[in-house]
Amino acid sequence: MRLILISAEVEPADEQALIFRFYQAGLRRFHLRRPAWGLAQCQAWLASLPAEMAPIVTLHQSRELALAGLVGGVHLKEKEQNEKGWNGVKKLKQVRPDLRVSLALHGLENWPEESKGADYGLLSPVFSSLSKSGYQADWSLSQIKRAVELSSLPLYALGGVEAENIAKLKAMGFAGCAVLGAVWQQADPVAAFLKIKQVVEQTWN
């Protein structure tokens, strides 16, 4: 798994039909991030997905839905990576040992211990964000490369990732990349996804 697609913050028209097309084209990790959504909205969204797609979904909120096997993973924001957050993950893992756990990382130091059960981290922003105005990287690429080398947790680059700069990410040691604006902000999201997927496959071949 080299490519992660993250949902747009506001649900686009025909989103699920598009995601199914991405899935048919090989998407195997989709992060549902809807900060404004509650449990009922997340549950309804998941219920309308084809059952075969449940394992590729990682939830950024309403993580209790993972107990019912409705998703394959959960994500912890940086502010949730505390004793309470990790205890919640531990309880989920007791019921779902197969559950994936990913982490948001927004700095190059003080990363949480991998022994707590995380499977991978999303480090951002690596480049200036396409979807968040003013959200820019404060580190040099050499600093990022050094930090990635020192981490035993597989890291995926997030923030400003698009087809034209993906090759730089492998050189920095990333396990893969996560995209958002490079797909959802395009006039043809399917064509954009397919182009990025092709570049990712060529880069990490």
Image (spheres, rainbow, N blue to C red):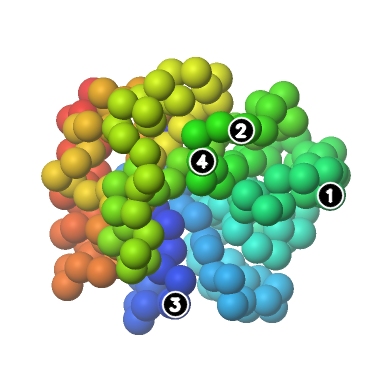
- Between the residue at mark 3 and the residue at mark 2, the CA separation in whole angstroms equals 29 Å
**1 vs 3, front mark:** 1
**Is residue 64 visible to the viewer in this orientation of the structure?**
yes
In the picture of the structure, the residue carrying the numbered disc 3 is: 10
Mark 2 and 1 residues: CB-CB less than 8 Å, in contact?
no
- Between the residue at mark 1 and the residue at mark 3, the CA separation in whole angstroms equals 28 Å
- Between the residue at mark 4 and the residue at mark 2, the CA separation in whole angstroms equals 8 Å
**Is residue 20 visible to the viewer in this orientation of the structure?**
no
Q: Position of residue 198 (x, y in %)?
A: 18, 41
- Between the residue at mark 2 and the residue at mark 1, the CA separation in whole angstroms equals 17 Å
In the picture of the structure, the residue carrying the numbered disc 4 is: 107
Crowd rating for badge 1 (residues with CA inside 10 Å; few <14, some 14–19, many 20+): few
Tell me which numbered mark, 3 or 2, is placed earlier along the sequence: 3
Which residue is rendered at x = 59% and y = 43% of the image? 103
**3 vs 2, front mark:** 2
Place residue 145 in its image quadrant.
top left
Which mark identifies residue 192?
A: none
Which mark identifies residue 84?
A: 1
Tell me which numbered mark, 1 or 4, is placed earlier along the sequence: 1
Looking at the rendered structure, the kind of residue marked 4 is: Gly
Place residue 20 in its image quadrant.
bottom left
Q: Secondary structure at mark 4?
A: loop
* Vertical arrangement, residue 60 with respect to residue 174, above or below: below
Looking at the rendered structure, the kind of residue marked 3 is: Val
Looking at the rendered structure, the kind of residue marked 2 is: Trp
* Vertical arrangement, residue 44 with respect to residue 138, above or below: below
Tell me which numbered mark, 3 or 4, is placed earlier along the sequence: 3
Which residue is rendered at x = 20% and y = 32% of the image? 167
Q: Secondary structure at mark 3?
A: loop
